[in-house]
Image (spheres, grey):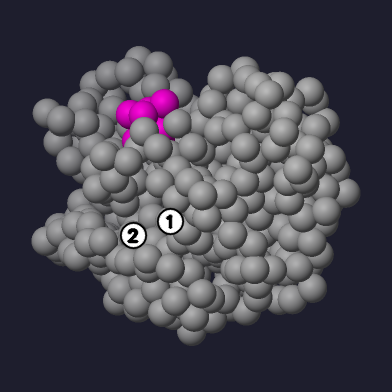
Amino acid sequence: MLGRGWIALVALGLAAQPAGTLTEQYREVATKLIDAAMVDQGGMEKLSYLCDRIGNRLSGSLGLEKAIVWAAAQMNHDGLVNVSTPRVKVPHWVRGRESLEIVGPIPQPLVLLGLGNSVGTPAAGVEADLIVVHTFEELDAAGARVKGKIVLFNVPFTNYGETVRFRSSGPSRAARLGAVAMLVRSVGPPGLRLPHTGALSYADGQPRIPAAAITTEDAARLQRMVDRGTPVRLKLMMDARFLPDADSANVIGEIRGRELPDEIVVVGGHFDSWDVGTGSTDDGGGAIATWEALRIMKKLNLRPRRTVRLVLWTNEENGGRGGLAYRDQHSAELGRHVMMLESDSGVFRPIGFGFTGSDTARARVRDIARLLTGIHADAIGAAGEEADTTPSVQQAHIPSMSLDVDGNYFLIHHTPADTVDKIDPLHIARASGAIAVMAYVVAEMPERLR
Ligand SMILES: [Zn+2]
């Protein structure tokens, strides 16, 4: 809450705030927000219902449709206003049945997950000899030996950005040389023979071949066999296919600003998930942590100067249409977006926020983050753009933030193990509190963040 003395300073044009000023100004309200986040299990209750009762939420699925209807009703129940579900057309990919087996030298079924957006195989499957490579250069060097083969990219996980390119571009790189199917070692750390799905991206002008992820353990086994000079023959069967684009929606709710309602602070996460597991850490928990930030403000009867808007984006995983639709449907007001924050790094101990924006804005955000030292969530990292905010952020040069966490996201995301039991209620509560403080102060402080 602003005191009269502060307003006088602003009026005198002395509002350039030294470091620490915001901290003192908002310490009391920040403490209230964090305390409120920690005393109830609201976030965990929502997440359990979403994941256990509604289930996973791939674009085009009944689960996602049900989740959208439920979220809009719950936002109204929480007292948010202007709750809406603007329509978004999304790709409708279905996995169908799938299997992979070693045919020779000995028969053995392997664990797989088809990659999102992959084509299927003919009904009888694809049977071919295996070739293992570890880089795109090694693939290209293999040249004519790739033709008619099933290619395995056996690339150890380093970090997501570095390793994921074999999943996304590998199929077309292999198809260019005549491969009949592509396998990728799962893009994640070893984890008890768990396959990790995720989207591929076919290049224009290349044949579209079926593609799947196998486990680290099975990739290592195939590698050992090839290293011993044993020819390996595999059979892949996938029913995967696209249906016509489906109707979906982003879900939006607000706390309307009391003085500058047309200036908007956006927080949110993506509401779709993969079709295995229940999308608990990716990104049910991330989405609900931002939602809870608004519920906590409402619970404390806090109505900041500017509008705080919650957006649950659709179709992040295999199309990004929700983020694009938000940009296009709100293009007239993007210039009045003060900041956009997306939480999509899983639910683990929050350590702070990534930030992308001007140096002045970064200094201000650092100052606000000092309010979070008590819960050790005060670090401000180098970059804050996330998949769903990027289209809007880049179009209108909006300061952007991500929630940064300390956890092994890539161990379970995109796997059947992404279930609610992995989520610590304390982490979702702390994340809600940290996001509530950041969003509230950015929406409340006299000067616009820029
Ligand atoms: Zn995600």
Give the percent coordinates (x, y) of residue 387. Answer: 43, 41
**Horizontal relation, residue 294 to residue 116: left or right:** right
Q: Which residue occupies 77% across, 53% down?
A: 30
Is most of the magenta stretch helix, strand or loop?
A: helix
> Does residue 413 appear in this view?
no
Which residue is situated farthest in the bottom direction here? 53
- The residue that disc 1 covers is 311
Give the percent coordinates (x, y) of residue 434. Answer: 71, 51
Give the percent coordinates (x, y) of residue 257. Answer: 50, 54
Q: Which residue type does callout 2 highlight?
A: Asn
Pick the front one: 186 or 276: 276
Q: How would you rate the neighbour count of disc 2 (Cα within 10 Å): few for under 14, some for 14-19, many for 20 or more?
A: many
Q: Secondary structure at mark 2?
A: loop
Q: Secondary structure at mark 1?
A: strand
Give the percent coordinates (x, y) of residue 182. Answer: 32, 41
Magenta span of residues: 390-397
Pick the front one: 99 or 40: 40
Pick the front one: 328 or 31: 31
**Horizontal relation, residue 137 to residue 88: left or right:** right
Say if the magenta span includes residue 392: yes
Q: Which residue occupies 60% across, 32% down?
A: 447
Q: Is residue 362 above or below residue 243?
A: above
**Horizontal relation, residue 427 to residue 319: left or right:** right
> Does residue 373 appear in this view?
yes
Q: Which residue occupies 57% across, 73% down?
A: 47
Q: How would you rate the neighbour count of disc 1 (Cα within 10 Å): few for under 14, some for 14-19, many for 20 or more?
A: many
Say if the magenta span includes residue 76: no
Q: Is residue 177 above or below residue 408?
A: above
Q: Which residue type does callout 1 highlight?
A: Val
Dots 1, 2 in contact, CB < 8 A: yes
- The residue that disc 2 covers is 250
